[in-house]
Amino acid sequence: LAGLKREFGSELAFWGGGMDTQHALLGPGVTLQSIEDEVRRNMEVLMKGGGFVFAATHNIQHEVPPETTLKVYDTAVAHRRYP
């Protein structure tokens, strides 16, 4: 994401990239903290200089527990303000 933002960030807006729904929401080692860390890290990269709309990169699958989906949403809302 950082390379894409660096190369194209002044020319286009990013819609998505806030969360990798295929790998970061399910599987071994996934915790609410790891989800928060990924959302915050992606937002910090993509928000620099503006032009970012938070969205998942794919649909959130039905196997994802509701508390996981809420953690993504709550983290995005908590860090939604541009510096």
Image: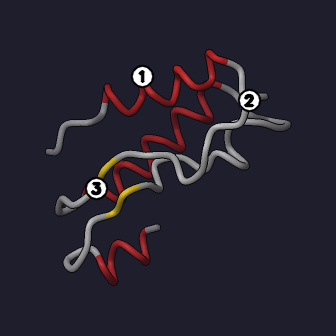
Q: Amino acid at mark 1?
A: Asp
- Give the residue type at disc 2: His
Q: Which mark is residue 74?
A: 1
Left or right of 37 on screen, residue 77: left
Q: Residue furthest top?
A: 67
Secondary structure, mark 1, is: helix
On screen, residue 10 above or below 54: below
Front-most of residues 11 and 44? 11
Q: Residue at x 34, y 51 (%)?
A: 44
Circle on res. 52: 3
For disc 2, the marked residue is 62
First in sequence, mark 3 or 1: give its number: 3
User: Which badge, 3 or 2, comes first in the chain's sequence?
Assistant: 3
Q: Is residue 2 above or below residue 29?
A: below
Q: How many marks?
A: 3
Is label 3 in contact with label 1 (beta carbons under 8 Å)?
A: no
x and y, in percent, of residue 78 in the image: 31, 26
Q: Position of residue 77 (x, y in %)?
A: 32, 27
> Which amino acid lies under the numbered mark 3 shown in the image of this protein?
Phe
Q: What crowding class fits label 1: few (fewer than 14 Cα within 10 Å), some (14-19), or many (20 or more)?
A: few
Question: What residue lies at 30% left-to-right and 33% top-to-bottom?
Answer: 79
Horizontal side, residue 25 vs residue 2: left or right: right
Q: Disc 3 and disc 1: Cα gap in Å?
A: 17 Å
Quadrant in the picture for residue 75: top left
| Contact? badges 2 and 1 (CB < 8 Å) | no
Residue drawn at (54%, 44%) of the image: 38
